[in-house]
Amino acid sequence: MTFIRTEIPDVVICEAEVHGDTRGYFVETFRQDKLEEFLGFTIDFCQDNESKSSRGVLRGLHYQLSPAAQTKLVRVIQGKVLDVAVDIRKGSPTFGKHVAVELTGENKRQLLVPRGFAHGFVVLEDNTTFAYKVDNYYSPENDRGIAFNDMDLEIDWQVDASSINLSAKDKIQPRLKETNDLFKYGINYYE
């Protein structure tokens, strides 16, 4: 497994080695020891989630506040998404900036989205299956979000706005500058 720091170094692309032959393929999708060695700290994933969506479905931008903040390790089993992580740590040199990575069933890439980031994805192919690990359980009282179309974030979702399909919750999320429910840069949210 190879780890690549993105333009926001705390967001990491994980690339697995795919072993294929005439029978199909084998891929090791997660190695906690290697990931922790690369990151330099421990992550204890406790819950796996999966969703299936059609083209144009946009889920996000979501995050949970402390003490329920989550690190996510996300991947696509089948299909294709544009996956986005937004830095929402006040005082960070990359506050309000984002990383966007195409994850597909073919490329087997994964994205590690750390605590202190909002996360979302838009589905680029029908019948896309998206899976992810989290290191904290879902907490409705700590659940927050940011508007996917916040112009200050300058995210190109690569889908025509008229074909985006949102949940009722995601239709009413505030802009980043309209929320005080954020993280502070320099605080270790893993302790």
Image (cartoon, grey):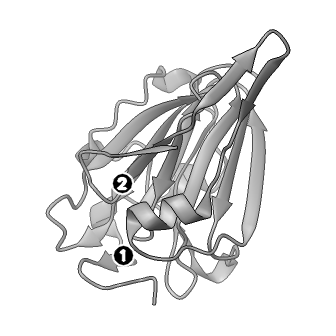
Frontmost residue, 97 versus 114: 114
x and y, in percent, of residue 45 in the image:
66, 70
Alpha-carbon distance for marks 1 and 2? 11 Å
Residue 157 visible to the viewer? yes
Q: Is residue 76 left or right of residue 188?
A: right
* Helix, strand or loop under label 2: strand
Which residue matches tag 2?
86
x and y, in percent, of residue 91 in the image:
17, 74
The quarter in which the C terminus is drawn is bottom left
Which residue matches tag 1?
182
Q: Is residue 167 left or right of residue 48?
A: left
Q: What is the three-letter code of the residue carrying label 1? A: Leu
Residue ranking furthest to the left: 93
x and y, in percent, of residue 71 in the image:
53, 66
| Tag 1 near tag 2, CB within 8 Å | no
* Helix, strand or loop under label 1: loop
Q: Quadrant of residue 163?
A: top right
Residue found 44% across the figure and 66% down from its top: 37
x and y, in percent, of residue 72 in the image:
56, 60
Residue found 70% across the figure and 76% down from its top: 137
Frontmost residue, 32 versus 78: 32
Q: What is the three-letter code of the residue carrying label 2? A: Val
In the rendered view, would you say 65 is above or below 4? below
In the rendered view, would you say 176 is above or below 58? below
How many residues crowd around disc 1 within 10 Å: few (fewer than 14), some, or many (20 or more)? some
